[in-house]
Each structure stands twice: as C-alpha cells, then as structure tokens.
Image (tube, rainbow, N blue to C red):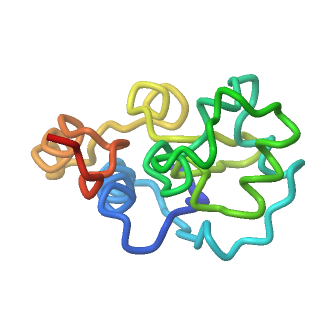
Amino acid sequence: MATVIFYEKPGCINNTKQKALLATAGHTVDARNLLTEAWTPERLRQFFGDRPLAQCFNRTAPAIKSGQVQPELVNAETALVLMVQEPLLIRRPLMQVGDRCEVGFEPAIVDQWIGLQALEGAAAQRDRLIQQDLETCPNAAVAP
C-alpha cells in the first residue's frame, strides 16, 4: 500500500470521498491544505505532467465561473502564475506517491497507478464511492 500526499481544499465534499476511496484500498493519506501550501510554478508543473494546462484548472473556481480567468486563453507561464497567486484555480486534488505526481482524481488512472481495490470488508463502500462523480463539485450551482 502507498502513502499518498493529498493536497486538498479542506471541507471539500469530493476530496473527502476521494480520501475515503484511497483508505478503502489500504492507502495511507497524508492530507495537506492546497490553499496554504507555498506553491511555485515549477512545483505545480510536476503535478500536471504533459497535460494541457487548461485541463489543470478548477472549473468551479469563482474567477473561472465569472469569466475573469479563461483557461483556454492563457499561456502556460501565465496559467502557473495565476494558480500560485490563487490556489482555488488549481484542479483538485494534487496527489504524490514517491516521485510521481498527479492532478485530479480519475479512478481508472489512480487504480492503474497505485490500485483502488478494496480491502476485505470494504468492497461495498468502495463500490458506492467509485460510482459517484468524484471530480465535479456537488456545491457548484447549475444554471436552470
């Protein structure tokens, strides 16, 4: 089992579910506050890998929802600077196990990486969690 450094927004409903899913698989979660971490553009870039930076933004961040920040219209350098200045713009969670870093919680990717098979007695909880949307904020207002 892995020790997962898990950068989250404290109180985030989906981050809580994601940590529970990791725990049902026997992983140790070292939860850290994404909003108070001393980020640098170089450090953030490690989590994003080769992904287009537009995919690494939190689409429910107020600055994005208001149109103040348009991820597809900013270059990589500007995107990283914006995220350092306003960590709410960062897609959550950021996870690190050893030298590998990832952004977001895509169950198939996490399962291939460190495994999400439930420990004995935790299969029902795992199945319930895995069937949920673990990335879209349930508190995000949807326009009628």
Q: Which residue is drawn at 72% across and 71% down?
A: 37
Q: Please state the total of marks drawn on the protein image.
A: 0
Q: Quadrant of the C terminus?
A: top left
Residue 83 is left or right of residue 126, and the answer is right
Residue 62 is left or right of residue 51, and the answer is left
Q: Specify the quadrant of the image occupied by residue 124.
A: top left
Image x and y of residue 88, in percent: 57, 60
Q: Which residue is drawn at 61% across and 60% down?
A: 5
Q: Residue at x 61, y 51 (%)?
A: 90
Q: Specify the quadrant of the image occupied by residue 105.
A: top left
Q: Which of 48 and 100 is in front in this view?
A: 48
Residue 58 is left or right of residue 26, and the answer is right
Q: Which of 127 and 42 is in front in this view?
A: 42
Where 12 sits versus 142, above or below? below
Where 134 sits versus 35, above or below? above
Image x and y of residue 127, in percent: 16, 38
Image x and y of residue 104, in percent: 51, 41
Where 21 sits versus 9, above or below? above
Image x and y of residue 24, in percent: 29, 53
Residue 65 is left or right of residue 53, and the answer is left
